[in-house]
Image: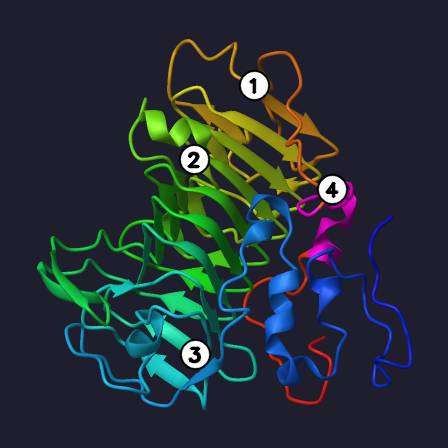
């Protein structure tokens, strides 16, 4: 059954709202979310459900929006992100952060923007999740990210190394595992909004709002890159606005479960691939653009694609949209009991994605 918020003595301030999706129903009805923020780590679903972020560490409060890539000051986001111990990072107030070089995350970190307005980008480089595990990014506006410059960037209290310069992604996931990106609003970056590459796996991208961009999400380093064949990514409950062009996502190889997302249009295509990926499109809401030659949801960037496993089930196609399936045999994500979630039919998606992007949460109230 679809998971719905329920009225109980634990949530005395609850008032009826449209049904929440299975991730949001885990925490959003609780008026005391700010008193036990780390419970959010119990709520991921899909392949990234194992991501715990800073669940077992202390809460660290960012008080200073400034940035120093080499010697970050205590109280800054970078200082918290590079620490070796688990940390749940929150913010003391509304902040606009322009990084001087890419922010390199360490393992077992959560960036949690709930309760304030935090934006990262503003013409600077943004977030790199590289060769680490257990990272959660939640409730952040990420926009206007530019390429990083070559130079020294600190990645831990004991190591600062020379970087060649980031590509200009909003969030780059590179050779990392157990990553969850949830309820962020991403737009207008130089390269991708979220890229998952170099053998990264066990990743969930959920409840985000994507807008004003060309190449939205790329999964895979280059065609035929062996490490990416093990990649498993869940893309669920996101909203892709009508001013996007392509790659929602583009999957070079590996496996992508694309479930209960809303697509308000595309300029070129919605879901693409180029090196025999497996893609299950399940319960999505596809509204094709008005252009007569852009109705197809899918695009294969190779000639011999008829054996690729691409399936559509429970999807809703509007304004002439259509999905071209291929291959044979099972396309199931084969989730574990921890990863599993109910996927509704496409007609339910406008309700399930109604609050995609950053939420306006207030302390002592349900985040509804």
Residue beneath disc 1? 309
In-image side of 182 versus 335 (left or right): left
For the residues labelled 3 and 2, the Cα–Cα distance comes to: 28 Å
Q: Secondary structure at mark 2?
A: strand
Horizontal and vertical percent for residue 227?
35, 30
Residue highlighted by disc 4: 346
Gap in angstroms between the C-alphas marked 1 and 3: 40 Å
Residue position for label 2: 250
The magenta stretch spans which residues?
338-352
CA–CA distance in space, label 2 to label 4:
21 Å
Sequence-earlier tag: 1 or 3: 3
Q: Residues within 10 Å of mark 2 (few under 14, many from 20)?
A: many
Q: Which is more toward the observer, 241 or 345?
A: 345
Q: In what element is the residue under mark 1?
A: loop
Say the numbered circle drawn on residue 118.
3
Residue 43 part of the magenta-drawn span = no
Q: Residue at x 59, y 36 (%)?
A: 257
- Label located before the other in sequence (2 or 4): 2
Q: Position of residue 24 (x, y in %)?
A: 70, 63
Residue 47 is marked as: none
Q: Quadrant of the C terminus?
A: bottom right
Answer with mark 3 or mark 4, whichever residue precedes in sequence: 3
Viewer-side label of 2, 4: 2
């Amino acid at each position: 059954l679809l998971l719905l918020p329920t009225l109980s003595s634990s949530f005395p301030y609850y008032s009826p709202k449209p049904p929440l999706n299975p991730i949001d129903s885990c925490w959003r009805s609780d008026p005391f979310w700010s008193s036990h923020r780390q419970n959010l780590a119990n709520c991921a679903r899909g392949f990234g459900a194992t991501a715990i972020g800073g669940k077992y560490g202390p809460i660290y409060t960012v008080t200073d929006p400034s940035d120093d890539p080499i010697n970050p000051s205590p109280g800054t986001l970078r200082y918290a992100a590079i620490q070796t111990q688990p940390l749940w990072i929150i913010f003391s107030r509304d902040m606009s952060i322009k990084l001087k070089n890419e922010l390199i995350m360490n393992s077992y970190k959560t960036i949690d923007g709930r309760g304030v307005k935090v934006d990262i980008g503003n013409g600077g480089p943004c977030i790199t999740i590289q060769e680490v595990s257990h990272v959660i990014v939640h409730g952040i506006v990420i926009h206007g990210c530019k390429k990083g410059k070559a130079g020294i960037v600190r990645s831990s209290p004991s190591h600062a190394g020379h970087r060649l310069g980031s590509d200009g992604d909003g969030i780059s996931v590179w050779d990392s595992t157990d990553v969850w990106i949830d309820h962020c609003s991403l737009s207008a970056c130089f390269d991708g909004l979220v890229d998952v590459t170099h053998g990264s796996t066990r990743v969930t991208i959920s409840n985000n709002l994507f807008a004003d961009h060309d190449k939205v999400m790329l999964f895979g380093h280059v065609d035929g890159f062996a490490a990416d064949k093990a990649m498993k990514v869940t893309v669920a409950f996101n909203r892709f606005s009508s001013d996007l062009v392509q790659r929602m996502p583009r999957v070079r190889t590996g496996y992508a479960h694309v479930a209960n997302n809303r697509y308000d249009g595309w300029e070129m295509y919605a879901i693409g691939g180029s090196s025999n990926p497996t893609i299950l499109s399940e319960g999505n809401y596809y509204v094709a653009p008005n252009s007569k030659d852009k109705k197809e949801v899918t695009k294969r960037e190779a000639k011999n694609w008829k054996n690729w496993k691409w399936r559509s089930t429970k999807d809703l196609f509007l304004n002439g949209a259509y999905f071209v399936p291929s291959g044979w045999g099972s396309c199931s994500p084969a989730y574990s009991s921890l990863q599993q979630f109910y996927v509704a039919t496409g007609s339910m998606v406008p309700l399930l994605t109604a609050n995609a992007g950053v939420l306006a949460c207030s302390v002592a109230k349900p985040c509804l």
